[in-house]
Image: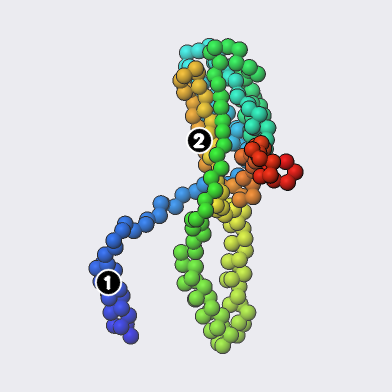
Amino acid sequence: MKKIILFIITLLAVLTGCARYPIPIALSHPTNYQLKMQSAQHWEVLAEDVAQRIKNSLKATFPNAVVKPSIFIRYTKEYEKVPFGKAFYHLLRSKLVQKGTVVLNDMGYKDTLLLDYDMQVVQHKDRRTTYPIPGMLTALGAGVWLVSQADKHWANPGLAAAPFVVGADVLASSSRYFPGETDTEVVINTTMTLRQQFIFGDSRIYYINDGDFDHYENDSKNFAVVGCAERSTCPAGQ
C-alpha cells in the first residue's frame, strides 16, 4: 500500500513538473490586512491620525518657524450631501485645533496652507474575496471520521462533538476581529498645499459594507429636461 501511495505522489510530481501553460499563471499577493470602516467612531480615529501626521509634517517642513503656518480646510457644498464628507470636516478641524494648530475659516492670508480631502468609492464586480482556511477541508473530513468512529467504539460518543463546539466558539470570537472582506472599498485622500507646492499627502484605503457606499459619495442623480422639437414626440406631461 505504501509503495502505491509513493508511486502516485511521484507520478503527480513528474506530471506537474512537465506541465506547460500558454499564459502566465496567476499568483496572489502575500497575505495583507486592511481595516474596515463601520462606524462614525472609525472616522474620528482617522481624523485623529491625519491631524497628528499634519502636525508632524508642519514641524518637519517649517523647523525654524516660531509660529507654524495656519491652515484653511476647503469645504464644498458636495460634502454636505454625504455623511463622511461633512463629519470628517468637523472632526479633522477639531483634532487640529486640539493639537495647537491654527485653523482659519477663510483664505485671507497668502501664506495660509490649503487642506483638501476627497473620497473615492471602488465597487468591485468580479473578484474572489473568500477562500477556505488552509487545512479546513482536511479537518472537516477527519472530524466526520472521528464522529463515526466514536459512535461505534467510544464509551462517550458525545465527546466527539466537543472539538466542533469549541471551534465554533473560536470562529464566532474571531469575527469580532476579522469582520470580513467586501466588494466595496473607499479611498480617502488628504492633501495640503502652499500655493503650488505640496506640503502634505495622505491616502488610506478601507473596506466598507456594501450598503454603506452612500456615506462616501453622493448617490443622487440629476436629470435635465430637454425641450421637444415637435410636440407629438414629447413624453406625456411635457
> Is 221 placed left or right of 200 in the picture?
right
At 54% across and 19% down in the image, what residue appears? Answer: 113
Question: CA–CA distance between discs 1 and 2?
Answer: 46 Å
**Residue 5 horizontal/vertical position (percent):** 32, 80
- Mark 2 Cα shell of 10 Å, populated few (<14), some (14-19), many (≥20): few
At 54% across and 48% down in the image, what residue appears? Answer: 123
> Quadrant location of the N terminus?
bottom left
Q: Which mark is residue 15?
A: 1
Asked which quadrant contains residue 23, the reply is bottom left
Asked which quadrant contains residue 148, the reply is bottom right
Residue with the most extreme right position: 237
Q: Amino acid at mark 1?
A: Leu
- Mark 1 Cα shell of 10 Å, populated few (<14), some (14-19), many (≥20): few
**Residue 219 horizontal/vertical position (percent):** 64, 42
Secondary structure category for the residue under label 1: helix
**Residue 31 horizontal/vertical position (percent):** 44, 52
Q: Amino acid at mark 2?
A: Ser
**Residue 118 horizontal/vertical position (percent):** 56, 33
Frontmost residue, 213 versus 139: 213
Frontmost residue, 47 versus 193: 193
At 53% across and 34% down in the image, what residue appears? Answer: 189
For disc 2, the marked residue is 203
Q: Which mark is residue 81?
A: none
> Quadrant location of the C terminus?
top right
Q: Earlier in the sequence, mark 1 or mark 2?
A: 1
Question: Does 218 sit above or below residue 209?
Answer: above
| Figure disc tally | 2
